[in-house]
Image (spheres, rainbow, N blue to C red):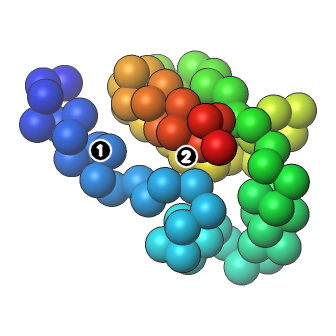
Amino acid sequence: MNWIDRFEETLKTPAIATPAWFECIPPIQRDEAHRLVAIGAPVCVKPTAGGGTTVLFDDTEFVAGVFQEAAVAERFAAVWNKK
């Protein structure tokens, strides 16, 4: 993956808690998404079996984002965890 791919991957995933991010969440899971955002639940980064990286809310299986490259996932998680 080159820098352009990483840049485009970053643009494809809206930041946690933004209106665009909530739109990406399936309607049946939006109440839980709002709850996790409201309490400021931190996120963690975990590799997936398929070689990608998933950002999950801590102590849950709730996915906040999925990325091909771990560095992009780490930056995505860090932005949310700074709040």
Q: Amino acid at mark 1?
A: Glu
Residue drawn 76% across the image and 72% down it: 30
- Residue tagged by mark 1? 9
Q: Amino acid at mark 2?
A: Gly
Find the distance from the CA under tag 1 to the CA under tag 2: 11 Å
Which quarter of the image is occupied by the N terminus?
top left
Which quarter of the image is occupied by the C terminus?
top right
Is 62 on the left or on the right of 48, as rendered?
A: right
Q: How many marks?
A: 2
- Residue tagged by mark 2? 65
Residue drawn 68% across the image and 28% down it: 44
Q: Position of residue 75 (x, y in %)?
A: 44, 30
For disc 1, the neighbor class at 10 Å (few under 14, some 14 to 19, many from 20) is some
Q: Position of residue 50 (x, y in %)?
A: 50, 26
Q: Is residue 53 above or below residue 10?
A: above
Q: Is residue 39 above or below residue 66?
A: below
Instruction: Decide which of tag 1 and tag 2 comes sooner along the chain.
Output: 1
Q: Indicate the secondary structure of the residue bearing disc 2.
A: strand
Asked whether residue 73 is in view, the answer is: no
Is 79 on the left or on the right of 1, as rendered?
A: right
Residue drawn 33% across the image and 56% down it: 12
Question: Residue lying furthest front in this view?
Answer: 83
The label shown at residue 42 is none
Please identify the quarter of the rendering in which residue 41 is found: top right
Q: Position of residue 67 (x, y in %)?
A: 43, 37
Q: Position of residue 73 (x, y in %)?
A: 47, 31
For disc 2, the neighbor class at 10 Å (few under 14, some 14 to 19, many from 20) is many
